[in-house]
Image (cartoon, rainbow, N blue to C red):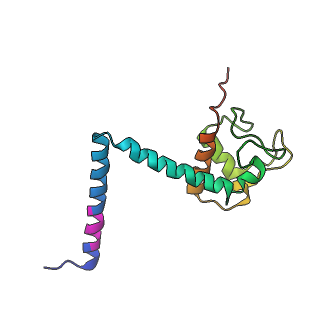
Amino acid sequence: MRLPKSIGLELAVAGLAVAAAGAFTQAAVSGQAAPIFAAVEQQASELGKKIFLGKGNCHTCHGANLKGSVLAPNLTDAEWLNGDGSLGMIESTVKAGVAKPKKHPAPMPPMGGAKLSEDEIKAVSAYIREQAQPPAKQP
């Protein structure tokens, strides 16, 4: 008895999903998960950097090294002008922009003036958070 093509394809996809889950479970049990997750994190960081230096236009004002300029603040230190420096705050700032900067003359348009997807916003925000010093503790 032959299965219809659509059912056969669904079974094949389900089988691949089970195999992938099994591979990750085996990697976790055998202690090999850390290198797999490190590789995934490295790829995400590279995507965030690519967006920062390219499509996101971030480097135009913040500099390629994220150290800031007369137009925009340093993103590598522990001083956060528009929030607590958390990943969520950075994502919100990237999405909404900064209409009235506290210390710099140029407003930051939402998403740097680019059209970024949710995944791109998350990637560039994670890259910025990764490059920055931990947020300063409030007394």
The x and y percentages for residue 116 are 63, 59
Residue 24 is situated, as x and y percent measured from the top left of the image, at 32, 49
Residue found 28% across the figure and 40% down from its top: 29
From the viewer's perspective, tell me whether residue 4 is left or right of residue 77. Answer: left
Q: Relative to 19, say whether 41 is above or below.
A: above
Q: Quadrant of residue 74?
A: top right
Number of numbered discs visible in the structure rendering: 0
Residue at the image point whose x is 20% and y is 77% from the top: 3
Residue at 59% over, 52% down: 48
Q: In which quarter of the image is the N terminus?
A: bottom left
Q: In which quarter of the image is residue 35?
A: top left
> Which stretch is magenta?
9-15
Quadrant where the C terminus is found in the figure: top right
Residue 62 within the magenta-colored segment of the rendering: no
Q: In the visual, does 15 lie left or right of 53? A: left
Percent x, y for residue 77? Answer: 70, 34
